Image (spheres, rainbow, N blue to C red):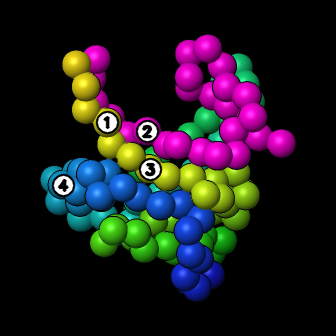
Amino acid sequence: MATEQVQRVVSVTPKAAEKIKEFMSQEAEKPEYLRVYVQGGGCSGLSYGMGFEKAPEDDDKVLEEGGVKLLVDSYSIDHLKGASVDYIESLMGSGFKINNPNVTKSCSCGHSFSTE
């Protein structure tokens, strides 16, 4: 397991950090980490995923942003360098949004993307 601190691979806004901590505290399993990842799928080739974890896997990088411990696997890290996790609240709904400078193309529905 790689536990070195990797700076600014993924940042977390203060609002997102607050919501992540709130949601973690409501989980029965009491997770310690938020996993942020990229997986194949969608009409543009890649999509984001997030989930809670109790422990890192062998190929995870462990990051800490805004008091939140993040896990990013070795496949996802290149696609997420410089990305930011935010939490948006609007009349149309609320939820997490990943702002990623590596995206070169995204689909019209906004759920998948591609990078070079």
| Residue range (magenta) | 92-116
Q: Is residue 6 magenta?
A: no
- The disc, 4 or 1, on the residue closer to the chain's N-terminal end is 4
x then y, percent, for residue 45: 74, 30
- The local crowd at label 3, few if under 14, some if 14 to 19, many if 20 or more residues have their Cα within 10 Å, is some
* Residue at mark 1: 88
The answer for how far apart the CA atoms under marks 2 and 4 are is 17 Å
Determine contact: label 3, label 2, CB under 8 Å.
yes
* Residue at mark 3: 85
Splitting the image into 4 quarters, where does residue 76 fall? Answer: bottom right
x then y, percent, for residue 9: 59, 65
Q: Which of the pair 37/107 is nearer the observer?
A: 107
Q: Is residue 2 left or right of residue 55?
A: right
* Residue at mark 2: 97
Location of the N terminus (image quadrant) = bottom right
Observer-side mark, 4 or 3, equals 3
Disc 1 element:
strand
Residue at image position (65%, 59%) is 81
Q: Which of the pair 10/74 is nearer the observer?
A: 10
- Classify 42 as above or below 25: above
Q: Which of the pair 102/37 is nearer the observer?
A: 102
Residue at image position (66%, 71%) is 59
Q: Is residue 105 magenta?
A: yes
Q: Name the amino acid type tagged 4.
A: Glu
